Amino acid sequence: YNIIIEHHQYYKVLSNMPIQKIVIMKNVMKKNVMITYFHFTFVRPKYFVFLANQTDIFFMPGSNHSKVRVDMWCGMHCAFAHQIVQNITLYLFVKWKRLNETWQINHVAIPDF
């Protein structure tokens, strides 16, 4: 399956599949338009796709100090919430003894929702 999303350049597309490439359209008729291509998958994808205004949402990377990395897409004012989510996630992984492999978890906090 190929997932390709055409959107305004001021929007950010997030998914559970990694982005392969982003193309900015040079066509006069399609000003300010980008196309986001996600990696190809052979199995039917269970996709989560999210579109957000880039001025409202920022990427806050998690710490690389443990086997669980908790990243968050949110407003800049959510740094404290990101720290809380990271601490809770680490606690649950220790409690359930799931730290035998490396995990990356992405959270999205929608502004004004």
Image (spheres, rainbow, N blue to C red):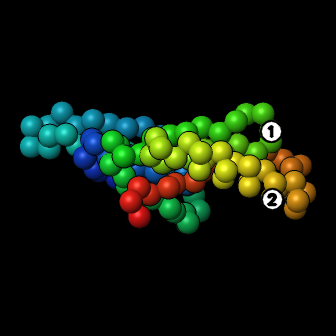
* Residue at (74% x, 49% y) in the render: 87
Which mark, by number, is residue 3?
A: none
The picture places residue 5, in percent across and down from the top left corner, at 34, 52
When the figure is inspected, residue 49 is found, relative to residue 23, above or below; the finding is: below
- Residue 40 in view, yes or no: no
The picture places residue 73, in percent across and down from the top left corner, at 50, 47
Which numbered disc, 2 or 1, marks the residue that appears first in the sequence? 1
Which of the pair 48/98 is nearer the observer? Answer: 98
Residue type at numbered disc 2: Leu
Q: Secondary structure at mark 2?
A: helix
* Residue at (78% x, 33% y) in the render: 65
Which residue bears the numbered disc 1? 66
The picture places residue 64, in percent across and down from the top left corner, at 73, 33
Query: Mark 2 packing: few (<14 Cα in 10 Å), some, or many (20+)?
Result: few
Which of the pair 21/59 is nearer the observer? Answer: 59
Which mark, by number, is residue 92?
A: 2
Quarter of the image where one finds residue 21: top left
When the figure is inspected, residue 49 is found, relative to residue 40, above or below; the finding is: below
* Residue at (50% x, 61% y) in the render: 48
Q: Secondary structure at mark 1?
A: loop
* Residue at (32% x, 48% y) in the render: 53
Q: Residue furthest left?
A: 29
Residue type at numbered disc 1: Ser
The picture places residue 49, in percent across and down from the top left corner, at 45, 59
Task: Quadrant for the C terminus, please.
Answer: bottom left
When the figure is inspected, residue 46 is found, relative to residue 13, above or below; the finding is: below
Q: CA distance from mark 2 to mark 1?
A: 13 Å
Query: Mark 1 packing: few (<14 Cα in 10 Å), some, or many (20+)?
Result: few
- Residue 46 in view, yes or no: yes
